[in-house]
């Protein structure tokens, strides 16, 4: 059974529909890639999944039961952990403090509960070793880590706190090739632990490398969800760029490249017409 | 080496170094004129306490990413809230003190609530409260007393249960120094040893990221605005009881000196980094400079120029040290 299922979800901000009729399922132990160009609605969908926004219409089901999340914290408590791009870590705080932020281990000191920093440092060290990150000192600032390491620490944190669903928002987009590969490795590691991973990206190659299921968004709607077996990388690329539009564009680019004067002339005429129609719709 | 680096990346390192430098300077220049005597030491500790009581709470608020410019005006307001009812209406001092603290908590709450709700910079919100509080203090004091001063508290203080904890000089050190030390210990402990302290860092480091992992950022910030207002009232209470009088202008510019002390102590103006101990050392430096100049031949009016130069030097030094902290690995 799916851990999370969205049924026919629509999200509007005022009169703008950011998402229309999205249905999506996340199973345990799968990497579900969410693809789409900028403005396709990926961020809005993540925010709904992680409890930041409530859907305007449609249903959010968790373990088969409808839920209404009112905050990221509530989602987190249910085991839905989100690693936001650029916002995963606080650079001036230590790795340990970041790791346990919001869920600090406590010990009783007389009548008051205090932050158990010894235990926190020990666990942080262990968890980072498990995923193969060697740090000299868990008390060093997160700002001393590389971008890939920060994402890795954020993933390790979510896994440690028993995430059942891990939402990763563009975890590889700001990284170099090597670093991205490291993060992709952690995604696979999390999957083998039975975690359902939602991997948001606009990089088809990264998605193809680790994904089991693919959902492509375009301008707030879904092109549908596909298993890896039903797809090729080229098909995926095509869908991301808006399907036929890309094919047409390819032909057009070919024409321009060939510099066939007659064809280019026709093309220019058509583009001009189209532009005119868009700028003066009622004429 | 690792241990050395750990020391190097501490936020208060710059301040501690500067404090030693300032001490050595005045020990050489003014050592024979009384800077090194017990009385001299007590004097600069006392001045340091006036800055320090405010600076430790201002440091926490700054680490959480906010400012409170209204604490100077709060000192003036709280002083009058205590002095006028006692001297004019015959209230028992303990009642007036409790009312002053309650009032400060309400003001602090409103400051914090407005900042959190409007998302306007706290600089603007608390600048407004700076003028509002000072204006009301002025207007109401004139209306009630016809003067800008309230005096004669001394006659009402003996035997009051609350007055004892805000006056006197246990072991030869004024009560303000004890409060300063106590606040440093308690707030420093809260910052580094409790989950709440972790949240303070997070709220100032990146409020959105903190909220996303479940830190109650609004609650943290509002509570710290209440804390700064309360420490301003604490200082006002100690001063009113000590001198027996107060003035509507009491505490003017104290908010900026507290920020200066916190910044000299390595607290980052934009939040997310700093320490309570640093703010205390910063306040100690202000105290030593202010009193130290008095013991030299230098005209004490130069104090502000020294303060400005130190502030600039501190910011540059701390900037450099923070860069090192992020680079070291």
Image (tube, rainbow, N blue to C red):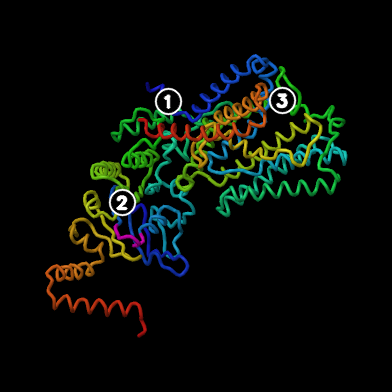
Nearer mark to the viewer, of 1 and 2 = 1
The quarter of the displayed image where residue A204 is located = bottom left
B63 horizontally vs B84: left or right: left
B167 horizontally vs A221: left or right: right
Start and end of the magenta stretch? A35-41
Judging by the rendered image, the residue that carries numbered circle 2 is A199
Please tell me whether mark 3 sits on a helix, a strand or a loop: helix
A5 horizontally vs A108: left or right: left
* Percent x, y of residue A263: 15, 77
Q: CA distance from mark 1 to mark 3?
A: 34 Å
As drawn, which residue projects farthest toward the bottom? A283
Host chain of mark 3: B
Secondary structure predominantly adopted by residues drawn in magenta: loop
* Percent x, y of residue A141: 41, 34
Judging by the rendered image, the residue that carries numbered circle 3 is B175
> What residue appears at the point 30 percent right and 33 percent down from the top-left corner?
A133
């Amino acid at each position: 059974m799916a851990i999370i299922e969205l049924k026919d979800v629509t999200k509007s901000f005022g009169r703008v529909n950011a998402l229309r009729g999205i249905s999506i399922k996340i199973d345990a132990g799968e990497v579900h890639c969410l693809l789409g160009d900028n403005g396709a609605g990926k961020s809005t969908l993540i925010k709904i999944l992680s409890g930041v926004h409530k859907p305007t219409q449609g249903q959010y089901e968790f373990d088969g039961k409808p839920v209404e999340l009112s905050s990221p914290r509530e989602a987190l408590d249910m085991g839905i952990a989100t690693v936001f791009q650029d916002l995963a870590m606080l650079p001036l705080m230590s790795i340990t403090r970041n790791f346990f932020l919001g869920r600090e281990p406590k010990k009783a000191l007389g009548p008051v509960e205090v932050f158990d920093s010894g235990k926190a440092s020990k666990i942080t060290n262990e968890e980072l070793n498990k995923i193969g990150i060697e740090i000299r000192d868990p008390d060093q600032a997160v700002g001393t880590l590389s971008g890939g390491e920060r994402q890795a620490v954020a993933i390790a944190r979510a896994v440690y706190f028993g995430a059942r669903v891990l939402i990763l928002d563009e975890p590889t987009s700001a990284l170099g090739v090597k670093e991205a590969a490291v993060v992709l490795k952690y995604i696979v590691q999390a999957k083998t632990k039975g975690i359902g991973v939602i991997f948001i990206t606009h990089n088809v190659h990264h998605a193809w490398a680790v994904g089991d299921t693919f959902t492509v968004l375009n301008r707030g709607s879904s092109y549908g969800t596909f298993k890896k077996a039903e797809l090729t990388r080229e098909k995926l690329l095509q869908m991301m760029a808006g399907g036929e539009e890309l094919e047409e564009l390819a032909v057009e680019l070919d024409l321009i490249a060939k510099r066939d004067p007659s064809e280019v002339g026709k093309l220019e005429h058509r583009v001009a017409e189209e532009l005119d129609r868009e700028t003066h719709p009622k004429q | 080496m690792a241990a050395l680096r750990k020391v190097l990346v501490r936020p208060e390192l710059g301040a501690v170094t500067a404090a030693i430098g300032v001490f050595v300077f005045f020990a050489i220049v003014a050592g024979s004129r009384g800077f090194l005597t017990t009385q001299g030491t007590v004097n600069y500790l006392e001045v340091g306490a006036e800055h320090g009581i405010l600076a430790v709470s201002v440091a926490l608020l700054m680490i959480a990413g906010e400012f409170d410019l209204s604490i100077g005006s709060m000192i003036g307001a709280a002083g009058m809230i205590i002095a006028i009812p006692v001297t004019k209406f015959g209230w028992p001092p303990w009642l007036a003190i409790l009312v002053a603290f309650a009032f400060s908590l309400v003001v602090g709450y409103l400051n914090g609530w407005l900042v959190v709700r409007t998302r306007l910079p706290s600089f603007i919100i608390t600048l407004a409260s700076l003028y509002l509080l000072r204006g009301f203090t002025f207007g109401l004091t004139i209306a009630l007393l016809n003067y800008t001063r309230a005096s004669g508290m001394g006659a009402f203080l003996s035997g009051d249960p609350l007055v004892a904890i805000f006056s006197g000089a246990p072991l030869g050190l004024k009560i303000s120094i004890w409060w300063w030390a106590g606040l440093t210990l308690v707030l420093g402990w809260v910052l580094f040893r409790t989950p709440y302290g972790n949240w303070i860092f997070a709220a100032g480091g990146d409020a959105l990221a903190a909220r996303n992992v479940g830190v109650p950022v609004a609650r943290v910030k509002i509570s710290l605005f209440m804390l700064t207002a309360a420490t301003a009232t604490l200082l006002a209470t100690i001063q009113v009881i000590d001198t027996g009088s107060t003035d509507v202008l009491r505490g003017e510019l104290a908010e900026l000196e507290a920020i200066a002390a916190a910044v000299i102590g390595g607290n980052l103006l934009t939040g997310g980094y700093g320490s309570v101990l640093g703010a205390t050392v910063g306040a100690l430096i202000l105290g030593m400079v202010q009193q130290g100049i008095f013991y030299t031949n230098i005209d004490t009016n130069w104090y502000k120029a020294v303060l400005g130069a130190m502030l600039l030097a501190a910011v540059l030094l701390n900037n450099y040290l923070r860069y090192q902290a992020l680079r070291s690995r």
